[in-house]
Image: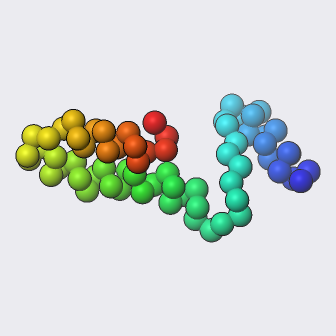
Amino acid sequence: MAMVERMAAFCHHIDRLPLLVKSTPGFLVNRLLMPYLLEAILFPQAVLVGEYQPFLALLAVLNPVR
């Protein structure tokens, strides 16, 4: 646990927020990346049919960062 505390202190030193997650390969990357990929796929379709509001509501639910 000392290494985790040292790394967290380093993150704070460089003005970054450490995010502790379970030790699962790719969990954090997938959790943050998938909503952006979904947005990139669905946005052109939403623009073509002019339905922005339902699309934005879906993004608000699926995106963990916002």
Q: Quadrant of residue 8?
A: top right
Give how far across and how far down residue 50 sits, in percent.
10, 40
Q: Hey, which residue is sitting farthest left in the picture? A: 49
**Residue for point 40% across, 43% down:** 61
**Residue for point 28% across, 38% down:** 56
How many dots with numbers? Answer: 0
**With respect to residue 65, does 33 lie above or below?**
below
Q: Hey, which residue is sitting farthest right in the picture? A: 2
Give the camera-side residue of 13 and 53.
53
**With respect to residue 40, does 10 lie above or below?**
above
In this image, 54 relative to 24: left or right? left
In this image, 36 relative to 4: left or right? left
**Residue for point 23% across, 53% down:** 42
In this image, 52 relative to 3: left or right? left
**With respect to residue 12, does 48 lie above or below?**
below
Give how far across and how far down residue 35 sits, in percent.
40, 51
**Residue for point 77% across, 33% down:** 13
Picture colour scheme:
rainbow
Q: Quadrant of residue 26?
A: bottom right
In this image, 53 relative to 37: left or right? left
